[in-house]
Amino acid sequence: MSATFVHHRIDAAPRQWQAVADRIAADGARRIAEAGGQLYGAWRSQIGRPRDEVQAISVWPQGITAAAAERALLATGDDINAVTSEVLTPTLRPTDTVPPSRQGNYAFRWFAVPEPNWPEFLDLCAAAWPGFEGAYDSQVLGLWQATGDRTGAGPDEVTGAGLHGGVRSLLLTRRPNLAMWERSKLPEGAAEAAVRDKLSRRYDLCDWTVVSTATLLTAVDRADTAHWT
C-alpha cells in the first residue's frame, strides 16, 4: 500500500485533553480532509502515558511531510503544550486505510530492531498474528516503519527517535479490554504456547521496545468514560 501514515502525540495543558480531542475530531478531521487526507483515529491515555496526552494518526494517500500533517491536524492554542509527529509507512499491515471504529484496549508498542534482524522480525509477526487474533478476540491493526521524517530534532523516549538505531516501528493492536491483555500473556494449550514462542522470539530480536495503552476517542460503538490515569 502506498499511503503515508503520520503518528501525532499531543501534550495537552492540564485537564484539557478532552477539549483538544474534540478539536482534533472536528476541526482537525475537516482540515485533514480538505488537504486530501483522513483522520485514521484519535486515542486517550489508558496506561503508561500522562493523562493529558492524546495520540492521533492521520493517513495521506499521496504522501505528506510530518510538519504539513501536523499543521493540518491541530492549530496551536493555549490548551496545547507540545505536539510531535512522525511519518510512518505500512509493512505487513494495514493493507487499506479503513479506520478502527470499535472501542477497546489499544496497545501502542514501539520497537527498535537491528537491520539484520528485521526480515526475521517480520516473518515472526506474519506467522504469529493469525493465531494471536483467533485466540484472544484481538486485531493487529498495523505495523508501520518509521521513515525518520519527524517534527522536533531532540531525542524522544516515547518512540525511540534519536536514541535507538536500526529499524524503528510502531505496532498497534486492539484487544477488547484489559482482561484480555493479561489473558494474552498467559498461554493455555499448545497452540497458544506456539504463538507466544513466536512473539517472545520477536522481542529477543529487538534492541529496545516500549508499550503503552489507550482507548479510542473516535470509536463509533461506545465512549470510554473511565478515569484511567
Image (cartoon, grey):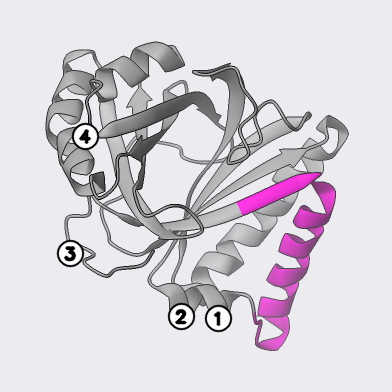
Q: Residue at label 1? A: 183
Front in this rendered view, residue 219 or 189: 219
Q: Give the spatial CA distance, label 2 vs label 4.
A: 29 Å
Amino acid under disc 3: Arg
Q: Residue at label 2? A: 179
Residue 14 lies in the magenta stretch: no
Residue 204 lies in the magenta stretch: yes
Helix, strand or loop at mark 4 = helix
Q: Give the spatial CA distance, label 4 vs label 1.
A: 33 Å
Marks 2 and 3 close (CB-CB < 8 Å): no
Amino acid under disc 4: Ile
Q: Residue at label 4? A: 24
Q: Residue at label 3? A: 222
Helix, strand or loop at mark 3 = loop
Q: Which residue is at a point 35% across and 20% down the rendered structure image?
A: 70
Q: Earlier in the sequence, mark 2 or mark 4?
A: 4
- Chain part drawn in magenta: 186-210
- Image quadrant assignment for residue 144: top right
Q: Position of residue 174 (x, y in %)?
A: 43, 60
Front in this rendered view, residue 161 or 190: 161
Amino acid under disc 2: Ala
Q: Position of residue 214 (x, y in %)?
A: 40, 57
Q: Give the spatial CA distance, label 4 vs label 3.
A: 18 Å
Q: Which residue is at a point 66% across and 82% down the rendered structure image?
A: 187
Q: Please tell me the numbered disc located at residue 52.
A: none
Q: Earlier in the sequence, mark 1 or mark 3?
A: 1
Helix, strand or loop at mark 1 = helix
Amino acid under disc 1: Arg
Crowd tier of the residue under label 1, counting other residues whose Cα lies within 10 Å: few below 14, some 14–19, many 20 or above: few
* Residue 174 visible in the current orientation: yes
Q: Which residue is at a point 45% across and 27% down the rendered structure image?
A: 84
Prevailing secondary structure of the magenta residues:
helix
